[in-house]
Amino acid sequence: MGIIVISSYRPKPGKELKLLEVVETHVPILRELSMATEREVIIMKAKNGTILEVFEWESQDAIKRAHEHTRVHKMWKEFEACCEYEILGNIDEAKHLFSEFEPLN
């Protein structure tokens, strides 16, 4: 059984399209490295422009390996160039009983 996560990325000004490009390659790269499962990825957007991604890690060990892998580090630098990581609880939609987001995939 894997570990499902919800990642939240707030785009830096003018970097929205670049962020979407990076998000779309994120899980495919993790899958190539046997770190993410084949479970469907959900990509969505909050009203404030934050992009949320729901995906499944293979295991806690896969997360640990990601923190040690040079290809993953390179990808994370691409994220850092175009976004700030956001805490899910800081997004207005997450404060509602039924959180609604705009689907992007």
Image: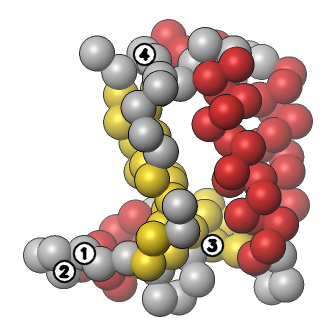
User: Which residue is found at the position 50% from the left and 11% from the top?
Assistant: 61
> Separation of disc 1 and disc 3 at Cα?
17 Å
Label 4: how many residues lie within 10 Å, few (<14), some (14-19) or many (20+)? some
Q: Which of marks 1 and 3 is nearer the N terminus?
A: 3
Residue 96: numbered disc = 2
Task: Please give the residue where the numbered disc 4 appears in the rendered image.
Answer: 59
Q: In this view, does 52 lie above or below 63?
A: below
Residue 72 lies, in percent from the top left, at 77, 29
Task: Please give the residue where the numbered disc 3 appears in the rendered image.
Answer: 10
At numbered mark 3, what does the secondary structure look like: helix, strand or loop? strand
> Separation of disc 4 and disc 3 at Cα?
26 Å
Residue 84 lies, in percent from the top left, at 68, 66
Determine whether label 1 and label 2 are within 8 Å by CB: yes
User: Which residue is found at the position 72% from the left and 30% from the top?
Assistant: 29
Q: Which of 101 and 95 is in front in this view?
A: 101
> Separation of disc 1 and disc 2 at Cα?
5 Å
Q: Earlier in the sequence, mark 3 or mark 2?
A: 3
User: Which residue is found at the position 53% from the left and 61% from the top?
Assistant: 105
The amino acid marked with disc number 3 is: Arg
Task: Please give the residue where the numbered disc 1 appears in the rendered image.
Answer: 99
Task: Name the side, left or right, on which 97 lies relative to 19.
Answer: left
The amino acid marked with disc number 4 is: Ser
Residue 1 lies, in percent from the top left, at 28, 15
Determine whether label 1 and label 3 are within 8 Å by CB: no
The amino acid marked with disc number 1 is: Ser
Label 1: how many residues lie within 10 Å, few (<14), some (14-19) or many (20+)? few
User: Which residue is found at the position 81% from the left and 40% from the top?
Assistant: 75
Quadrant of the image occupied by residue 98: bottom left
> Separation of disc 1 and disc 4 at Cα?
27 Å
Task: Name the side, left or right, on which 7 lies relative to 72.
Answer: left
Q: Which of marks 4 and 3 is nearer the N terminus?
A: 3
The amino acid marked with disc number 2 is: His
